[in-house]
Image (cartoon, rainbow, N blue to C red):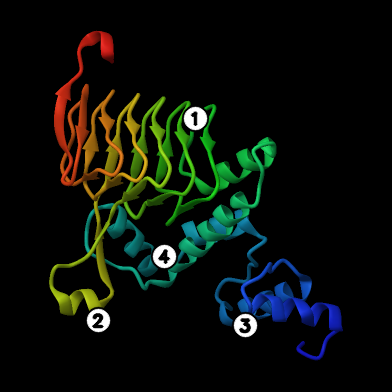
């Protein structure tokens, strides 16, 4: 491979220098390596739907780790089943990040493969990143600005008409307090996040594991949400606290 045509070899040199990667010379060895390393799963990255079926019907031991993860139990994040789910999600969100807003049909097709569910009029400005995608459930008219990150190890529900500013981070993933478990055992825990209808989360805000944000709430820019936020309020700060209860006319 490394003695191939000069033009293609130039793409290899670009890749190791951090430049554009979509060249057959680079994709071919990636596919070859995947076939060798994943003999238990004879699908390529291009076989997205087939791979999804394989993963969701994986052998019992591997699938149990996924069930533990979404059930809020300690799970082994190094499990091959979970790693493949993450790689599948990465392929999809990276493909999405190369699209333009005018690529409506392509984006909708990626959404249907990436997310657990989504409603009408979904707008996500690229780049966007997530962990698994399949644990993410979005209502109607959801809007996410640039560079949002959702680590959906547990279920994440986002209600209708909810808006995210740029750089919003949603983290369901947590880690053991015990350093030895955290470093060597590979065990994590995830806690579900629920964000209600008509919520506005300002740019740079972080929502931590296990949090519920009620309907019509406004979360100030840069806030760190560590506890539940009730409906019909404005909450700001680190840690995020309610500073105002919204009147009926303000909802």
Q: Secondary structure at mark 1?
A: loop
Cα–Cα span, label 3 and label 2:
28 Å
Q: Earlier in the sequence, mark 4 or mark 1?
A: 4
- Where is residue 241 shown, x and y percent of the image? 14, 37
Q: Whole-Å distance between the Cαs marked 2 and 1?
A: 40 Å
Q: Residues within 10 Å of mark 4 (few under 14, many from 20)?
A: many
Cα–Cα span, label 4 and label 1: 26 Å
> Mark 1 and mark 3 in contact (Cβ < 8 Å)?
no
Q: Check residue 82 in the rendering and tell me which mark sits there, or answer none.
A: 4
CB contact under 8 Å: marks 4 and 2: no
Q: Is residue 182 left or right of residue 27?
A: left
Asked whether the residues under the numbered discs 4 and 1 touch, taking CB atoms below 8 Å apart as contact, a structural biologist would say no
> Helix or strand or loop: what does disc 2 sit on?
helix
Q: Which residue is mark 1?
A: 119
Indicate which label's residue lies in the foreground, 4 or 1. Answer: 1
**CA gap, disc 4 to disc 2?**
18 Å
Mark 4 against mark 2, which lies toward the viewer? 2
The front one of 38 and 2 is: 2
Tell me the residue at 28%/23% (across/down): 216
Question: Of marks 3 and 2, which one's residue comes earlier in the chain?
Answer: 3
Q: Mark 3 or 2, which is nearer the eye?
A: 2
Kind of element beneath mark 3: helix
* Residue occupying the far bottom of the picture: 3
Question: Residue at 47% across / 39% down in the picture?
Answer: 145
Identify the secondary structure beneath mark 4.
Answer: helix
């Amino acid at each position: 491979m490394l003695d191939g045509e000069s033009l293609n070899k130039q793409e290899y040199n670009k890749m190791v220098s951090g430049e554009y990667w979509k060249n057959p010379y680079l994709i071919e060895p990636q596919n070859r390596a995947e076939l060798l390393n994943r003999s238990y799963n004879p699908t390529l990255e291009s076989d997205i739907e087939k791979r999804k079926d394989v993963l969701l019907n994986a052998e019992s031991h591997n699938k149990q780790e996924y069930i533990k993860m979404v059930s809020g139990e300690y799970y082994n994040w190094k499990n091959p089943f979970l790693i493949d789910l993450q790689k599948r999600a990465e392929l999809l969100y990276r493909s999405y990040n190369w699209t333009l807003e005018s690529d409506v049909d392509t984006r909708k097709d990626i959404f249907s493969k990436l997310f657990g569910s989504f409603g009408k009029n979904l707008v996500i400005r690229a780049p966007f990143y997530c962990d698994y995608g399949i644990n993410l459930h979005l209502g109607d008219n959801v809007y996410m600005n640039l560079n949002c990150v959702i680590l959906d190890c547990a279920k994440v529900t986002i209600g209708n008409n909810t808006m995210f500013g740029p750089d919003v981070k949603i983290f369901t993933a947590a880690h053991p307090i015990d350093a030895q478990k955290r470093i060597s055992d590979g065990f994590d825990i995830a806690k579900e996040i629920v964000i209600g209808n008509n919520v506005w989360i300002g740019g740079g805000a972080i929502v931590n594991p296990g949090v519920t944000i009620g309907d019509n709430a406004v979360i100030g820019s840069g806030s760190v949400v560590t506890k539940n936020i009730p409906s019909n309020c404005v909450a700001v700060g680190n840690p995020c606290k309610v500073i105002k209860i919204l009147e009926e006319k303000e909802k």
